[in-house]
Amino acid sequence: MSAVYITMLGEFSVSYRDKTVSEKEQRGTKMWTLLQYLIAHREREIPQNELIELLWTEKSRNPANALKTLIHRLRKCLSEILPEGTELILNNGSSYRFAPNIDCVIDSGEFARLCQVAEDDTLSRVRRANTYKHALELYRGDYLVSRSGETWVIPITVYFHTLYTATVDKYVRLLYPMGKFAEIVRVCEHGIIINPTDEKMHIQLIRAMTAMGEYTQAAKQYEYIKTLLLEQYGAPPSTRLTELYETTVKPRNETQENLDAVVGDLSEGVETGGGYYCEYEVFKYIFRANFRESKRHKRSLSIGMFTLTDEGGAALNDNKMLGKAMSKLSDCIGVSLRMSDVYTRYSRCQYIIMLPEADGVACEQIKQRILNKFRRFQNKNKIYADFRSMQVWTDE
């Protein structure tokens, strides 16, 4: 008899030879939850009361009979793909369990086994890498993704997801000295599909892209994760990710004897009017430089913050509308600031501006110019821009 193959990672299914049954093809959420629970706890017999509590939160007139009916339906469904007489679900009086002696391969168990094998540092680098690769090919998605919100599934999902991300990291570390950059890109792109906001995965992907000379793709990847983090968490990328982008996506390793060429490269794309927009990490460096200059001359430095809210002053939840509003506000800020002013996006609904050599009166004038330009969009969409400013004194 060939082995029964069960997938628990990603879409759940049971296969035997060329026949497969999955929860997408068959109706009955309770039936599949029952089977998945028995498989997940296959090392023990499950009392029927435990199964009843799992499957019926509401009171049932005769839950024991309802469970027997569900077991019957499940066995009938599995019999369509299994050899005659093969039973995956066994019962012993008032308890049930997944058959322990059936020749069966469960992808989650095989994934964990292969990860453990690959940990053996006495194996060759190539063999360890191949074992990691085989393990990762089994991870088509998180554990029982269709049940991801259920209490009993969550700790198992966390375990396998943590094991998966650690395995990707170890696999990538083996691949770098081997120059397998295309394979790093492949495995990280798959990982990002599973967990789009994993910054470590994006860092590894960008590093591999730059190693292959694919600077344009690396820049697009950085812009993608930067935007996603702002939309999902209202926070900019980590310092590590930003510094990687700044130092490797556009490297300058060659010796340049022509200073005019260097100046031309530095000034490329510089706007001739309006404020200067930059990433938050760059903004911090510019602020610190201006702070030192202001301290030297014993004068203040003006900082302002724009925050978008709804009519009641609460944060916006409509990501699509927020994206449009933030883009519009950015345009209004850019054309309203002076060439010496700098601004950046601070969170999903905020911009901060720095106004060197601007006193309170000038700061108020700039604020009014920006709000006046934004007012037409604001009135149409009922989105409001709140502005707060302060003078940072540096003469202490």
Image (cartoon, rainbow, N blue to C red):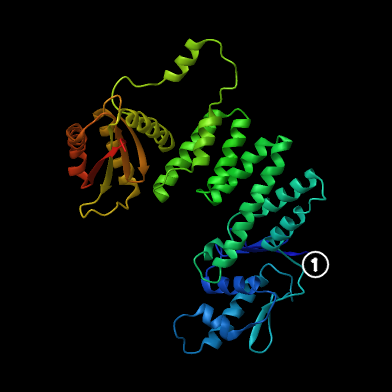
Point out residue 188 in the picture as x, y percentages from the top left corner: 60, 44
Image quadrant of residue 338? top left
Point out residue 256 in the picture as x, y percentages from the top left corner: 56, 14
Q: Which image quadrant: the N terminus?
A: bottom right
Residue 18 seen in the figure: no
- Given residues 169 and 382, the one toward you in this image is 169
The amino acid pointed to by label 1 is Met
- Given residues 182 and 262, the one toward you in this image is 262
Residue that label 1 marks: 1
- 183 sits to left or right of 51: right
Farthest-out residue, front: 396
Q: Which image quadrant: the C terminus?
A: top left
201 w.r.t. 254: above or below? below
What is the crowding at mark 1: few (fewer than 14 residues within 10 Å), some, or many (at least 20)?
few
Image quadrant of residue 282? top left
Image quadrant of residue 155? bottom right
Number of numbered discs overlaid on the protein picture:
1
- 258 sits to left or right of 125: left
- Given residues 171 and 194, the one toward you in this image is 171
Q: Residue at x 67, y 72 (%)?
A: 79
Q: Residue at x 53, y 51 (%)?
A: 195
Point out residue 360 in the picture as x, y percentages from the top left corner: 19, 35
257 w.r.t. 372: above or below? above
- 330 sits to left or right of 177: left
Could you tell me which secondary element the residue under label 1 belongs to?
Answer: loop
Residue 174 seen in the figure: yes
